[in-house]
Image: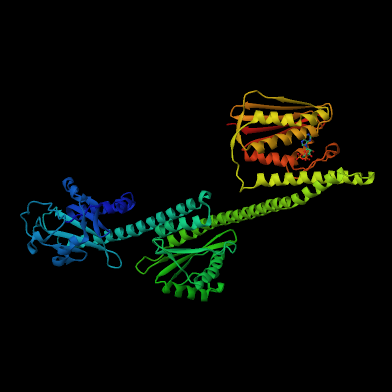
Amino acid sequence: MVEGGATAHQEDTRAGWSDSAARAVLQLMVESVAEMVGFEVAALSVVLDGNLATMAYTGPEEFRDYLSASDPVTVLDPVLARAESWGRFRFLAAEDYDAATLEGHWMVVAEEQADVPDAWHPMDVLVGLLTDDDGRLVGAMSVDRPVSGRRPDPAQRRLLERYAAQAERAVVTAFEREELVQQVAHSEAARRLIRSASMPAQASLQAVLDHTHGPLVEGFGAAGSWIQVLDPESGGVGYARTHEGDVVTLSDRMIDLAHGLAPRLWEAQQVLVVAEGVEPSLSAKSGAGPLLEEARRQIAELGLASAMAVPLGAGAECLGFLVLSRRAQDPPWSSVEIGSALQIGYDLGAALMTVLALERERGLVRELQQLDDYRSQLIATLSHELRTPLTVISGNLELLGDLDLDEAARHYQVAMTRGSTRMQKVVDDLLLLARVSDPQHPLVRVPVDLHAVSRTTVDLLASSALAKGLDLRLQCAPDPLLVPGDPAELDRLLTNLVSNAVKYTPSGGTVTVAVERRGDDAVLAVADDGMGISEEDQVGLFRPFFRTTNPDALREPGTGLGLTIVATIVDRHAGEVRVRSRPGEGTTFTVTLPAG
Ligand code: ADP
C-alpha cells in the first residue's frame, strides 16, 4: 500500500483539514472499510498541491511512522500502468510486477502469505482512486492485510467500491468546504487589512489607495485591482495595478465606464461579475446594457478572463469603484467572494468618505493659511508704504512747530502732530505684529534675563508713572532669571503690559511688576488697582484692534494692537498669558514662559 505524508509547504493547507470535521468523517470511513470489508489496514490520502497527504489511517501502530513521509501523486503511476481495474479500485498482483519498479513509500505490511487458495501476497497492492466530477484525482484509499488472508472476492469488491464512492464524496465535499472556508478567511483578512489601512493615522487618499491594493489582490487571489475615486473635487483619482503592484494605465473609456457603472451598482447594492458566459446580474432596466458590453470588450482587451466590479460608497453617496480581475486559469468568483466584496465596498466607501472629508478640510486649512499669509503680507506692505510718507509729515510738522505761527495755525499744527503720532504708533504696531506673526520669520532664541528686562522697562516707564501720580513697583530677585527667547520681543511684551497698567490706572494707584521662577517656568505678573476690565471685554481682549466699551478706557489713546502683540509673542515662546480683572478693582496679567 502507499502512504503519503505532508511536506513543509503543505503544512498550512493540511492544518486547515486537521481541525475540520471532514477529517473525523474520513477517519470513520477508513475504520468502516477495515471492519466491514475485513482488512486490518486501511488508509485515506488526499491530494494537496500534487502530493498525497494521509488524512486517516487504521491499522498497527508501527506503520503510522510512514505517514510522515511525503509522496507525489506520480507514485501511483507504475500501479496504474499494470493494475487490474475493479471499478474505483486498482489491484496489482505481486506476480504481475517487479517490486523494484515501485518508488516512494510503498509499505509491505504483511510478512507471510497465508496457506489458502487465492491467498493475499504481502506485495499485493489494492488502492482506490477517488476523483472529483471532472475526473481529477482528489484522493486515494488503500487497504491491506485482509483478515481472511485471501484476495477480495466479488462480494468484497462490491463493498469496497461502495465505500470508495462514499469516501470520494466525503473528500470532494471536504475540499469544497475547505475552499469555501479559505475564501472566507482570505476575504475576511482583506477586510481587516482594509480597515486598518484606512485608520486616520495614515488617512490620506493616496495612503488608502496604496495600502488596500495588497490585501485585496492577496485576499481575493486577483490578477489585479483598480480603484477609481469618483470625487469631483479630488479630480477623480484612480489606480489600476497588476498583482505585483505595477501601475496599469487605463483608457478614458474605462474611466467613463467606472463613472457610468458605479452609481448604478451602488443604487442597486450589487456587485457585478463580468465574464465570458456569465449572465450579468445588473438588471436590464438600469440601462446598463451598452456599459456591460463595453466592460466585456475592455476586459478582453486587457487579456483578462473576468472582473468583479464593486461599488464603493457611504449612505446615499457612491464614492468610487473597485474592480478585481482574474485570468483564464483562475477560478470563477464564488458567491462567498461576491458577498465579501460588497462588504468591502462599504468598508472602503467609509474609508474614502473619511479621507475625502479630511482632504477637503486640509485643503480648506491650506486656503485659510494662504489667506492669512496674504493678509499679513498686505498689512506689512501697507505699513511699510505708510511709514515713509508719515515720517515726512511728522518731520515737516515738527519744522512747522518751530515757526512763529499765529494761534489758529498753531492749533492746527498741534492737532496734526497728535494725529500723525497716533498714525505712526498704529503703523509701528502693525509692522511689529506682522513680523512676529510671520511664519517665515522664526524665533531665534538666546538666553534673556527677564529680571534685567523688567528693571529696564520699569525704569523707562517710571517717569510717566510718576507724572500720573502712580506708585510703580518692581518685585524681583537680584540674580538673573534666564528665559530662552528673543530679547527685543520679550522687552516689547513687558513694555506693552506695564504701559497698559500705567495707562488704565487712575492717579494715586499702584502698579506692581513681579517676576519669579516657579519650577521650570518664569512667571511674570503685572498687577494694577486701576479701572479693571469687564467680563465681556476680557473675552475679546487679545483680538487685533479690540477696544473696550468702557468710556474711561476709551479716553486713553491706543491702537488695540498692544495685547495682540503680547499674545503672539507669548505664543511664539511656548508660553501662556492669563488675565484676572474686576471692573473698578484692578487687573493682573500673568505670563508664564518656559525658563532655561
Ligand atoms: P490699546 O492700545 O487700546 O491699549 P491693547 O491691546 O493694549 O490696546 O488693549 C486692549 C484694551 O484692553 C484696551 O483698550 C483696554 O480697554 C484694555 N486694557 C488693557 N490693559 C488694561 C489694564 N491694565 N486695565 C484695564 N484695561 C486694560
- Which residue sits furthest top? 478
In this view, the residue in front, 569 or 13, is: 569
Left or right relative to 196: residue 416: right
x, y percentage for residue 26? 28, 54
Q: Residue at x 29, y 58 (%)?
A: 171
> Residue placed at 80% from the left, 36% from the top?
534
Q: Residue furthest right?
A: 407
For this rendering, which residue is in front, 94 or 453? 453
Quarter holding ligand 1: top right
Residue 5: x and y in percent read 22, 52
Q: Is residue 5 left or right of residue 12?
A: left
> Is residue 104 visible in the rendered structure shown here?
yes
- Residue 492 lies in what quarter of the image? top right
Image quarter of the N terminus:
bottom left
Res 278 visible: no
Q: In the rendered image of this protein, does residue 456 appear above or below residue 393? A: above
Residue at x-position 49% and y-position 55%: 207
Who is closer to the viewer here, 544 or 31? 544
Q: Position of residue 335 (x, y in %)?
A: 43, 62
Asked if residue 529 lies left or right of residue 331, the reply is right
Question: In the rendering, at what x and y percent does residue 226 appear?
Answer: 47, 64
Counting labels gives 0
Q: Residue at x 51, y 55 (%)?
A: 347
**In screen coordinates, is 405 left or right of 70?**
right
Colouring scheme applied when the structure was drawn: rainbow
**590, 124: nearer the viewer:** 590
